Amino acid sequence: MRNEMKLNDDWRFHLGEIGSPVKTVKKAGAIGGLTAPLKGEDGEQITIGQGGKHFLNLISQGDLKRGLRMLAGTDMDSELTEEWDRIAIPHDWSVAVPYVDAPELLMSGSKPENIGYYRKTFSLDATLEANQIVLKFDGVMRMASVWLNGIYLGDNISGYTPFEFDITEIAKFGDEGVNVLLVRADTTTGAEGWWYEGAGIYKEVRLQFLPKVYVDDDSFYIYTKEIGENAVLGCEATFVNCTDKPQTVRPTLHVGDQQVAFDGITIEPLHSVSINKDFLIYQPRLWTPETPHLYEATIRIYGEQQNIDEFSTTFGIRKISYDKNGFFLNGSNYLLKGVCEHQDFAGVGVALNKDIVEFKLLKLKEMGVNAYRSAHHFASKDLLDCCDRLGIIVMNENRILETSPWRLRDLEKMVKRTRNHASLCFWSIANEEVIGNTKLGHRMAKRVTALMQSLDYEHLLVSAELLNPEGIVDQEYMSNFDVVGVNYPEAGVMGEGLKKIKANYPEQPLMSTENASYFSTRGIYKDNAEKCQTNNFGSLYSMVLPGKRKLGDPGVGGTARPEEVLDFIEQNPYMGGSFIWTAFDYAGEPAPFGWPGIGSQFGVLDTCGFEKDYFYYYQSKWTETPMVHVMPHWNKEGLTFNEDGKVEVRVFSNCDEVELFVNDDSQGKQSVGEHHNSWVVDFIPGELKVIAYSKGEAVVSDARVTAKEAVDFLTEVIYDGETTQLIKVEAIDGAGNVVPMANNALDIAIKNGSLLGTGNGNPAYAEEDKENALHLFSGKALLIVKKEAAAVPKIKVAVAEGCGKEGQLSAVSDSKGNP
C-alpha cells in the first residue's frame, strides 16, 4: 500500500551563489560535491563498482579522488560551511533579507533578488526498495533546479506550480548510505508577478511510496453530470503498471456505503489503462457555501484477492451555471460576495502552513465572504481543501495567457490536480492581459480553453479583462469563455464601457472579477504621505495622479469606494457579485506611495489579519448576526478635524437603529442607513459608544475610550491551530484601555514554543525588527508561534531597552492572556 514521508525538517540553507553544480556529467552519478555524501555523512561520495575502482586506480596511480576529477570532472572539494543555516520547510528567505530602497524593487516589496541553496540528507529503509518512489515539491519560488545522489533531476520554472520526480532507481536504501538532496532556487531569472512573490522552498516537500501497480492520483476525477431527485456522476481513473509483466486488476469505487464495480482489466508492462463509468448518488446533499457537504470517494484496485492500492478524494455535488442574468448555484441565482487575494502573510512571507491558510479563510467567513479569487496564480491544495470544508467558492486563476509548451504542461497539471474540489466553480484564464481582444490573444485563448475543457467538464471559464471607455471588444476572442470578466467596472475612470458592451451583446454573460482597490491604513484617520499612511474615512491620495488631490479627482482613495462597489452590484445584478481587491494587505505594490512604502493598503484586513474599519462595512452588508462598529478611535492625536473643529463619527451596522453617545450624552438615534450612519461631533475625551437596536431592543454595542500612555501589554490567542498559534499583542494603559496609537518596541520571550515570525501591519518601512523583537503599530502586533508537543506556549512581552518607559514594564501571560 502507498505511504508518504515528509521532508520538511532538518534542512541546511545557504543564501547566495556557491558555484552551481553541473547539470550534465561525464559519468553516471558522478557530480559529487554537495549533491553527494560529505565527510561525516554515511555513504560513498560516488558509488563505484570493482571494475570502476580498478580503472580509476590505473589512470590515477591509486588516487581515486584524482581519478574521478580526471575522468568525470567530479566535485571532490565542496563542503558545508558555517554560512549554511539550519531551517525547516516551509521557508521564505526573503522575509529575513533587509529592505532595499530601489525604485525597481518597489512593486515586489523592496526585497532584492537572489539565489538560495537547500540541502537535506535522509535515509530509507531497505524494505522501501520494493516501491515506486516519487519526490514531490508543493512549491519552490522561483526557478528550481534539483539534484539527488550526484544526479541532476531537472528544473521547474514557475513558483506557482507543484512538481515531482520519479526517483525509484536513483534513491539509496539501507546500508547504501544516506540520500543527498540539493535544491537551487533562483529568483534572478525574472519575476512572474508584479507583487511580492517570496523566495525559496515555501511549501512542503515529501516522498510518496507507491506499489508497482497503482492509481495515478491526478487521473481520479469525480464530476457531476445531472442533478435531480438523484445525481448522475461520472468517474475517471488511470492505473499504472511499473512491473515487467502484465498485471490484471479489478477496480472498485467506494462512495459512502455505495460500491461500484468495474470489469477486470489487464495492464501491459510499463503501461497504463484508463477507465470511466457513470454512477448514481441517491437523494444527494448539495454543496453550497452555507451547507458545504463533502462526499469522499475511494478508488481501489485488487489483484489476487488483495487490495493493491487505493486513493481517496473528496468532492461535492452542485450545479453551476452563468447566463446574462448572473451566477446560478444549484438552480438559484446566487450573489458572489468575493475577494481577491495574494498568498503572503505577516512574518512568514509566502511560507504559509495549513494553520495560517485556515486562519485567513476563517476571517473572511467572519466578514461574510462566500467567494475567493486566487489572484493571480494557481490556488494551493491547502487553500482549496479549506475552502471545500468551510464553504467558499473559488475562482482558480491561470498565471498567464501563454501557450508555450511548459505553460501548457503546468496548466494541464493544475487542472487535473484541482478539478475534484467542491469549492472550485470558476477558472480564470488570465488577468488583465494587454493582448486581450487581439488575434494573438484569441489564438492562445482558444488553445488554452480547449485544453481545459478536455480535462474539466463542469467548471466555468472566465477571463478577467481590461475595460475601455468605448466598450470595444473582439467577439471572436470573447467566444472562448463561458463568462467575460471585467475588472473595476464601477470605477469612474472606466467610463461607459460596460454599458456599451451590455447594449451591444445583451446575451453575453458578464462578471465583475475585481473591485474597489480602496486603500486604508489600519487605525489611521488622517493622511500622512511621509509615513505612507492613508485615512480610513477615505484618502485624498490617488491611484493615478501624483500628490494629494481633492474629492472627485480620478483615482482618489482607490479605484472606487466600497459603497460605490456594492451600489454598482445592486444596480447591475447580471454582474454576479463582486471580488474585492483585496482581502488582506500584501507585501509589495505600495500604492499610492513610493518608498518607504513596502506593502499594499488595499486590504480589508492588514497583513496580520487585524480588521480595518471597512471589514465591518462588508460584514454589515454580508452577514445577519447583529453587529455594530464605530470609527474612529477616541484619542485626539491622530484624528482629522473639520473647519469647525469637529470630528466625523461613522457607524456600520446591520440592525434597525443606532444611537451614538459621547460620555453617556446621546448624539441622537438614527435608522440604519443604506451604507453607514454618521455624526459630526465635538471631541470630548472619554468614551465614544454606539448602541444598535433591533425591533426597539438594544442588541449589540461598540465603544472607543480615550487612552493614556501604554503601561502593559496583553497577549491573546486569536487562532489556535494544529501546529501554530497566532497571538495578538495589544498595548493597554493603566485603566486597561487599548492604546490605539502605541508603537512601542518590544522584546519577546517564548517558552514551550518557537517564534516563526512577527508582524504589525505597518505598510511602510520603519525599522528592521530583530530576532524575538518587534514594534507595535496602531497599538497591535502579531506573534506567529510554533507549538511544541502538548505544552501551552507562554509569552513574555517587555518594552525593549531604550524604548518607551524604562524599567520592568512587562506582562507575563500564557497565550490566552491569563497571567
Image (cartoon, grey):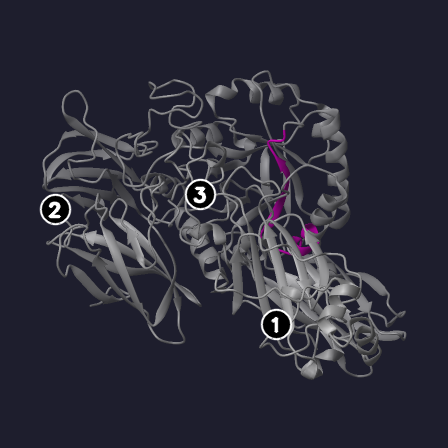
Rendered location of residue 552, percent (x, y):
37, 18
* Residue 390 vs residue 145, the one in the foreground: 145
Sequence-earlier tag: 2 or 1: 1
Separation of residues labelled 2 and 1 (CA atoms): 60 Å
Residue type at the position of mark 1: Leu
Q: CA distance from mark 1 to mark 3?
A: 41 Å
- Residue underneath mark 3: 586
**First along the sequence among labels 2 and 3:** 3
Q: Residue at x 13, y 55 (%)?
A: 806
Q: Is residue 132 magenta?
A: no
Between the residue at mark 2 and the residue at mark 3, the CA separation in whole angstroms equals 31 Å
Relative vertical location of residue 426 with respect to residue 48 in this rendering, above or below:
above
Estimate the x, y position of residue 287 in percent, counting from the top left: 57, 55
Local SS, label 1: loop
Instruction: Magenta stretch: give its range.
Output: 414-433
Mark 3 belongs to which amino acid?
A: Tyr
Q: Secondary structure at mark 2?
A: loop
Is disc 2 in contact with disc 1, using a CB cutoff of under 8 Å?
no
Q: Is residue 48 left or right of residue 776?
A: right
Q: Residue at x 42, y 38 (%)?
A: 600
Q: Position of residue 237 (x, y in %)?
A: 77, 62
Q: Which mark is residue 38?
A: 1
Compared to residue 55, the image places residue 631 above or below, namely above
Quadrant of the rendered image containing residue 70: bottom right
Q: From the image, state whether disc 1 or disc 3 is nearer to you.
A: 1
Name the amino acid type tagged 2. Answer: Lys
The tally of labels here is 3
Residue 768 appears in the picture as rendered? yes
Residue denoted by label 2: 708
